[in-house]
């Protein structure tokens, strides 16, 4: 439940409510806006608690939260979360674009892609050093060498880097190279991994699982938030359905649903959602129109020779065309493309 304090409540009155909640062995989450102060109650509550808290000085209302996730809920945290990575702001008025190869293959491939996507307007460089694969015979990434290449690309371009972490034991080493850690779809319910990325002081992007409901996705986010890391970004990347015309089914409706139910920023990944390069741009435009805070796009110098996911990767020219197409869509919904990282 949440406790809404009256406008003008003193700090001593706010502290009085907080202390009473703690006396009951319950946790708190404090959210102070321009007008109201909201105190979230964490833990197993009981029916009498609502009336008990209402009697405390300057409490305006006590509202039960029916959803099983608390920290990820918009009721609990009315202000939208803004995640800042260097000079790139995610979740604000500007639309952010993360772009780069699915997998880091070699230094030339990564650096040439980084230069091109930055010139086209991308803000954050993506690239996989550790790659989860359905088949054990597929390319699984360069590991530490890939991380070092990403760091070199960041040094040359100044762009922040996002890359995937796959195991709890790799969190520290990936965090030492990356600016944003990505938890992939296959690891969305790897709760040990969620706990570990929740303990670090760097932004995390959590992808929706292949067959996960929105509630399951937000509960996975709750694991990260409950460990103290509030720099969390969600990513809709398509879900598995009966449809075979695309790699996955892009759930466009998930974007406005997240905006209604959660304060967390949301990125759309049309590359993994569609699996086909010629569907990436139209689904990207639809995602922005639906309210996404940004995009994650796979780009490769020569998709036909890519070691991973070439079929869904854009060429440099196609990525440039997408970036040009995004501008009028952003303007139509009162937003603009971010210039951070460029």
Image (cartoon, rainbow, N blue to C red):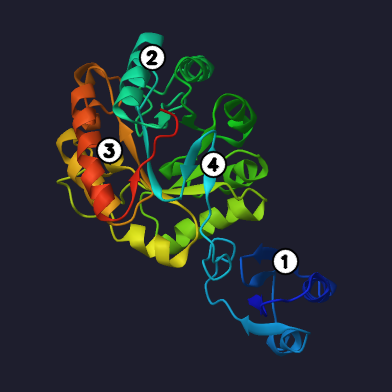
In what element is the residue under mark 3?
Answer: helix
Horizontally, residue 130 falls left or right of residue 295, namely right
| Mark toward the viewer: 4 or 1 | 4
Mark 1 in CB contact with mark 2 (< 8 angstroms): no
Q: Which image quadrant for residue 168?
A: top right
Q: Is residue 184 above or below residue 66?
A: above
* Residue 11 vs residue 47, the one in the foreground: 11
Tell me the crowding category of disc 3: few under 14, some 14 to 19, or many 20 or more residues within 10 angstroms, Cα based. Answer: many
| Mark toward the viewer: 2 or 4 | 4
In what element is the residue under mark 1?
Answer: strand
Q: Earlier in the sequence, mark 2 or mark 3?
A: 2
Tell me the crowding category of disc 4: few under 14, some 14 to 19, or many 20 or more residues within 10 angstroms, Cα based. Answer: some
Name the residue carrying label 3. 271
Horizontally, residue 236 falls left or right of residue 19, namely left
Name the residue carrying label 1. 28
Horizontally, residue 78 falls left or right of residue 97, namely right
Q: Earlier in the sequence, mark 4 or mark 1?
A: 1
Q: Which mark is residue 84?
A: 4
Q: Earlier in the sequence, mark 1 or mark 2?
A: 1
Q: Residue at x 41, y 10 (%)?
A: 107
Mark 1–mark 2 distance (CA, rounded to whole Å): 46 Å
Mark 4 in CB contact with mark 3 (< 8 angstroms): no
Q: Earlier in the sequence, mark 3 or mark 1?
A: 1
- Residue 226 seen in the figure: yes
x then y, percent, for residue 110: 38, 16
Name the residue carrying label 2. 111
Q: Residue at x 38, y 27 (%)?
A: 136
Mark 4 in CB contact with mark 1 (< 8 angstroms): no
In what element is the residue under mark 4?
Answer: strand
Q: Residue at x 61, y 53 (%)?
A: 225
């Amino acid at each position: 439940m949440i406790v809404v304090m009256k406008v003008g409540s003193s700090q001593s009155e706010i502290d009085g409510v907080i202390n009473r909640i703690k006396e009951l062995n319950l946790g708190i989450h404090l959210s102070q806006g321009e007008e109201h102060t909201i105190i979230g109650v964490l833990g197993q509550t009981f029916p009498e608690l609502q009336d008990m808290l209402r009697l405390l000085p300057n409490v305006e209302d006590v509202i039960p939260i029916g959803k099983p996730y608390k920290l990820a809920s918009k009721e609990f945290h009315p202000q939208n979360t803004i995640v800042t990575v260097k000079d790139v702001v995610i979740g604000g008025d500007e639309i952010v674009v993360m772009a780069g190869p699915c997998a880091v293959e070699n230094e030339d491939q990564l650096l040439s892609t980084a230069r091109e996507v930055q010139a086209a307007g991308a803000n954050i460089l993506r690239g996989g050093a550790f790659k989860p694969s359905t088949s054990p015979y597929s390319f699984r990434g360069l590991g530490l060498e890939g991380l070092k290449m990403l760091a070199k690309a960041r040094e040359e371009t100044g762009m922040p880097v996002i890359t995937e972490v796959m195991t709890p034991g790799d969190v520290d080493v990936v965090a030492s190279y990356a600016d944003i850690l990505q938890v992939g779809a296959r690891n969305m319910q790897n709760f040990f991994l969620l706990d570990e990325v929740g303990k670090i002081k760097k932004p995390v992007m959590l992808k929706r699982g292949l067959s996960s409901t929105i509630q399951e996705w937000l509960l996975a986010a709750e694991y990260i938030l409950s460990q103290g890391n509030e720099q969390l970004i969600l990513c809709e990347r398509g879900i598995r359905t009966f449809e075979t015309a695309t790699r996955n089914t892009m759930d466009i409706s998930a974007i406005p649903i997240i905006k209604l139910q959660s304060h967390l920023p949301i990125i759309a990944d049309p590359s993994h959602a569609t699996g086909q390069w010629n569907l990436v741009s139209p689904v990207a435009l639809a995602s922005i129109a639906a309210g996404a805070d940004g995009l994650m796009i796979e780009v490769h110098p020569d998709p036909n020779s890519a070691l991973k996911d070439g079929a869904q990767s854009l060429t440099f020219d196609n990525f440039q065309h997408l970036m040009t197409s995004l501008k009028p869509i952003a303007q139509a919904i009162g937003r603009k493309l971010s210039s951070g990282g460029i």
